[in-house]
């Protein structure tokens, strides 16, 4: 039995018969690729303000998307952008052998003392169990022996992205990072 529940009518789950009672063939695997659209109009026929052009994700495109979102950031000059908020910082960078993985990593400014390690792991596991975006984890001890807490999203984008999707991913990452830190301070009662 799979560790997730199948919904009725979903491939591979429940009845595998057609309406006439014969066996139906279930094909597993990726869908055939769709032909890229060469238009810059939205599905409703209006002009698409972002353009439908798919292009490689670069640090300059990430910076442009953050500018559209009114997120102020600093550049470290080595391929990372850092945005700072009152209670946390968010790193936007590209990682992987070909810089094809968009990484959004949030870190609250507050840290946890080492004797709170068990509680930190429980709180982080609760977040991971009950939330959809950003995996959370307890980092390695700092030079002062404190434990940092992180939330991170990694999105493989070797095929590139159009501007609207990149803006949406960065907006989601920044919003969830803020929610995570607020949750740690309030409901999670860790910081």
Image (spheres, helix red, strand yellow):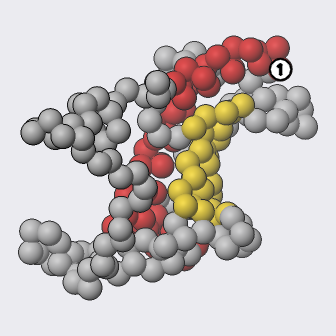
**Residue 84 visible in the current orientation:** no
**Percent of width and height locating residue 163:** 38, 72
Camera-side residue of 111 and 15: 15
Total label count?
A: 1
Residue 97 shown left or right of residue 166 in the figure:
right
Rendered image quadrant of residue 78: bottom right
Query: Which residue is rendered at x = 47% and y = 40% of the image?
Result: 133
Q: In this view, does 173 lie above or below 14?
A: below
Name the element at disc 1: helix
Q: Is residue 41 above or below residue 114?
A: below
Rendered image quadrant of residue 76: bottom right
Query: Which residue is rendered at x = 31% and y = 72% of the image?
Result: 34
Query: Which residue is rendered at x = 67% and y = 33% of the image?
Result: 137
Which quarter of the rendered picture does the C terminus lie within? top right
Camera-side residue of 61 and 54: 54
> Which residue position is annotated with label 1?
114
Camera-side residue of 20 and 68: 20
Query: Which residue is rendered at x = 77% and y = 18% of the image?
Result: 117
Q: Is residue 134 above or below residue 156?
A: above
**Percent of width and height locating residue 188:** 55, 18
Looking at the image, the residue that sits furthest to the front is 22
**Percent of width and height locating residue 54:** 39, 78
**Percent of width and height locating residue 180:** 51, 33
Mark 1 surroundings within 10 Å by alpha-carbon count, few (fewer than 14), some (14 through 19), many (20 or more): some
**Residue 106 visible in the current orientation:** yes
Camera-side residue of 16 and 52: 16
């Amino acid at each position: 039995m799979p560790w997730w529940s199948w919904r009725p009518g979903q491939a591979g789950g429940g009845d595998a018969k057609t309406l006439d009672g014969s066996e139906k063939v279930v094909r597993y695997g990726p869908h055939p690729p769709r032909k890229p659209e060469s238009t810059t109009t939205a599905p409703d026929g209006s002009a698409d303000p972002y353009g439908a052009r798919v292009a490689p994700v670069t640090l300059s495109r990430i910076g442009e998307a953050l500018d559209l979102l009114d997120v102020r950031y600093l550049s470290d000059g080595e391929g990372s952008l850092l945005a700072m908020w009152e209670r946390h910082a968010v790193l936007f960078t590209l990682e992987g052998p070909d810089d094809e993985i968009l990484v959004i990593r949030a870190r609250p400014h507050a840290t946890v003392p080492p004797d709170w390690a068990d509680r930190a792991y429980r709180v982080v596991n609760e977040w991971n169990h009950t939330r959809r975006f950003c995996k959370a984890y307890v980092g390695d001890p700092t030079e002062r022996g404190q434990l940092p807490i992180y939330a991170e999203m990694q999105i493989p984008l070797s095929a590139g992205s159009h501007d609207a999707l990149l803006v949406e991913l960065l907006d989601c990452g920044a919003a969830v990072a803020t929610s995570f830190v607020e949750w740690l301070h309030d409901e999670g009662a860790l910081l």
